[in-house]
Amino acid sequence: MNVPSEEPRGTDRTLVPVIAGLACSAVSFALVVQQGRLTGASPAANGLVTLVVCLAAAALALISMRVGRLAKRAVFLITFIAIHIAGIGALGLTFLDVAGGDAPAFLTGALEALSGTGSVLLAFYWLRKLRAATADATALVAFSALMVSAVLVAVLGILGPAVRHLAAFALSFAQFAITRASRRHDAPGEVRPAQPGAYFGTGEARYSDRGYLATALIGVCGMALAAGVAEALTPPTAGDPLAEVLRRLVSLACAGAAAFCALRHARSHPERPLAPELWIALGLFVGVGTVLLSLGGEAAFAGGSVATAAALLLQAMVSYLSVAFASFGARDPYVYAAVSWVALNACQVVGTDLGYLVAAAAPGNLAPAIAVMGLCALASTQVVFSQLMRDPERTVVLSDLEEGNLPERITPSTIVIAASIEQALLEADGSAGDASSAAVGAEPSASPTPVDIATDDSNTSAAPTPAPAPAPVPAASPEVHIATSVISMGQRFGLTGREIEVLTLYALGHTQARVSEELHLSQNTVHTHIKRIYDKTDLHSRQEILDYLAEYEG
C-alpha cells in the first residue's frame, strides 16, 4: 500500500537559509583556520589549531551524550555563543593584521582556534536543522553549500590576511540574520518526512547501532588520511599566484562536476541511495590523484588539484552522513555532527603529517607515500562497501510486533510500515480465499458434500465428515490495529504522509509534546498538523477520532 505523498517538491525555499548558514560557517573556518586554503589542516604548527578545534567539538559530543537530547534553549544558547566567539576571534585577528608587526604565535593561534570553534559549532547547528529531511534535500544543501563556500574561499583566500579575517568577521555575524530568516519557515524535515532507506539503503534500526556508526567513521577516516597524504605530496605554489589560481580552478571544476552529477541523481531518483555513488566518486578522484602524483612534475600539480576536489567532496559526504544519523539515530544530532567532523579533520592532520614523515624517510622517492595513500583509500572503500552498504535485514517485521518482541525504540514509521504489511497480507488472503471459492464452485466435487449425505435416503447411516476448522488468525496488537485504521482513514480523507504519522501517535494517546519529540517537530507544527486533520475529517477531538476508527475502520 502506498502512503499518500507529502506536498510537492516546491519546498526548496526552506533550504535557502540552511545553505547560506552552512556555507558562511565553512567559509569563515577556511579563511581563519585554513588561512584561505580550500581544504586541509591549519598551516600553523602542523595543524595544531585544527586539533584544538577538534578537541572542542569532541567535548560538545561528550556533553551531548551525557545529557541526552539537548533542549531548544540549550541549542539557542550554543548558537548565540558560537556566533560571538567566531566573530570576535576573527575581529581580533583583523586588529593584529592592521596593527602590523609580529604578533605572538600563541595569541594568533588562540584567536584562530576561538574563531574556528565558533564556525564549527554554527555548522553543527545548520546540520541539526536538517535532521529528518529527505535524502535529496540533504544532498542539495550539502553540495550547494560546498560549492558556494568553495568559490568564496577560492576568491577570498588569495587576498591578504586582513581581508580574509575581516570577511570571516562579517560572515560570522551575518549568521544572526540567516538564523532569523530560517525561523520564518518550517524546518526542512517538517515539510517532507525522510525515509531511512534513501540515505544508505538500510533500515531505521541500524542508525542507532554504534557499530554501524563506527563503520561509517572508519570509512571517513580512511579517505581523510588519503587526502592528507596527498596534500603533503602536492608541490607548493607559494610565490606563484597564477599557479595557485589555476590549481583552485581545477579543483573547483572537478568538485563542481561531481556535485552536479550527485544533485542530478538525487533529484531524479530520490528513492535510490546516493551514498554508493558518492563513495565511488571519492574513490575515483583519489585514484586519479594518486596516479598523477606518482608521475611527478606538472602531473603532480594536477594530481594535487584532483585530490583537493576529493577532499571537498568528502566534506559534503560528512554533512550527508551526519544528517542521516541525526535523523534516525538515538543520539542528539550534535553527537553525530561532531564525531563525523572530528574524524574528517583530525585524520586529515594525521595524514598530512604522515605524508611528510614518509617522504622524509625516503627522500626523492614518492613510492612509499603513494602506497600509503592508496592503501588508505582502498581500505576505506572496502570497509564501506562490505559493511556500511550491506543491510543484514535487521529491521522489525510485523511478527515481531505481534509477538511482543519490540525494539527499544519504536518510531511512527515502524508502526506504519508494520500496519501496511498487515493490511497487504489481509488483502492477499482475502483475494486468495475468493479465488479458492470460485475454483470450488466451478469444478464438480468428486466426494459427496455434507448436504448430499444428509438428504440421501440410502446413506442415512453415514456420518458427515466435518470440514477442517480454519487456523485461528492471530490478533494484531492494538498499536498495529490503530495504525492500520489510520492508514485507511488517511486514504479516505486525503491526509498527507506526515499527517498520518502525527495522527497515528495522537490516536495512540500521545500528547502533542510527545508527538513533537518523537517526530522531531516543533509543537506549533504538530498543532498545525492536528488542526488540518480536524478540518479534513470534520472531527473535533481525539475521542471523536477514536470513535470514528472504531466504528468505520475497525
Image (cartoon, helix red, strand yellow):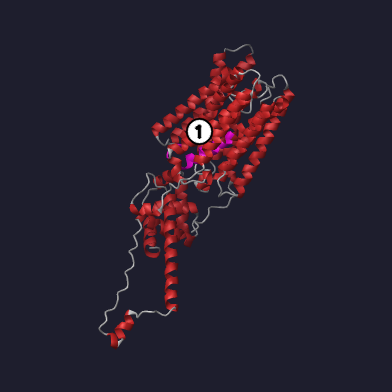
Reply yes or no: does residue 83 show up in magenta: no
Q: Position of residue 505 (x, y in %)?
A: 40, 51
- Which residue in the rendered view is the most extreme toward the right? 242
Look at 36% across and 79% down and name the residue there. Answer: 447
Q: Residue 299 falls in which quadrant of the image? A: top right
Reply yes or no: does residue 324 show up in magenta: yes
Q: Is residue 200 above or below residue 32?
A: below
70 sits left or right of 147 in the view? left
Question: Viewer-proximal residue, 429 or 23?
Answer: 429
How many marks the image carries: the answer is 1
Q: Position of residue 353 (x, y in %)?
A: 57, 21
- Which residue in the rendered view is the most extreme toward the bottom? 457
Look at 34% across and 60% down and name the residue there. Answer: 475
- In this picture, which residue range is highlighted in magenta? 314-332
Q: Amino acid at mark 1?
A: Ile
Are there few (<14), some (14-19), or many (20+) residues within 10 Å of tag 1? many
Q: Secondary structure at mark 1?
A: helix
Look at 59% across and 44% down and name the residue there. Answer: 13
Q: Which residue is mark 1?
A: 218
